[in-house]
Image: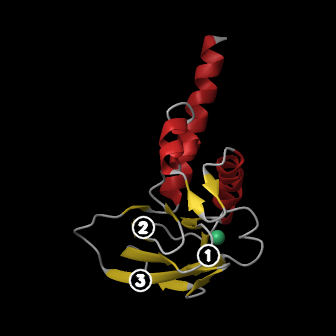
Amino acid sequence: MKYFFLAIFLFTTNSIAASMSMVGEKGDPNKIDRIIEIEMHDNYYYPTQIDVKKGETIKFIVKNLGEFVHEYNIGTKEMHMKHQPEMAKLIEHEIILADKIDIVKMKEMSKKDHSLGHSHANSVLLEPKDIGEIIWKFSKNVSLEMACNMPGHYETGMVGKINIK
Ligand SMILES: [Cu+2]
């Protein structure tokens, strides 16, 4: 029985690591090829899609110009679908409110449940008027989307293609 649980644990952690490395990797801040500015509005991105070259390291400067909390997340469509229940959980626990993030509560509760910490190299979560950044290396040729996984935002258009050429 013990081995059975261990096997499940290994399988889950491996599949998370695999899905992350499938979309690229955290970029080296000393090897940035290009900077792209992203504006987040209610509920869309500007630009609406971006082109990157395979192997390029991009520094994304992300500005939330909307009135709600928004996320900039780089992943496959499947990854976004899996991330949405996690975001819903943050809202359920009132760690994220429509226009605010309770950082103190987030830190406190993530001690018990790591998924509540929302710490992902491929994502940044911002309050209105806030600016954040992601440095990402597009080392794989896969179909990617930039997306916000706040409940309802993806469905109402807060998603755009990342074209890797
Ligand atoms: Cu959003």
Q: Position of residue 150 (x, y in %)?
A: 67, 62
Indicate which label's residue lies in the foreground, 1 or 3.
Answer: 1
Can residue 98 be seen in the rendering of this structure? yes
Identified at 71% across, 70% down, the residue is 153
User: Callout 3: helix, strand or loop?
Assistant: strand
Q: Quadrant of the N terminus?
A: top right
In the visual, does 59 lie left or right of 19?
A: left
- Residue position for label 2: 139
Foreground residue among 149 and 82: 149
As shown in the figure, which amino acid type bears the numbered disc 2? Ser
Identify the mark nearer the N-term, 3 or 2. Answer: 3
Identify the mark nearer the N-term, 1 or 2. Answer: 1
**Relative to 103, does residue 14 appear above or below in the rendering?**
above
Q: CA distance from mark 3 to mark 2?
A: 17 Å
User: Callout 2: helix, strand or loop?
Assistant: loop
Foreground residue among 160 and 104: 104
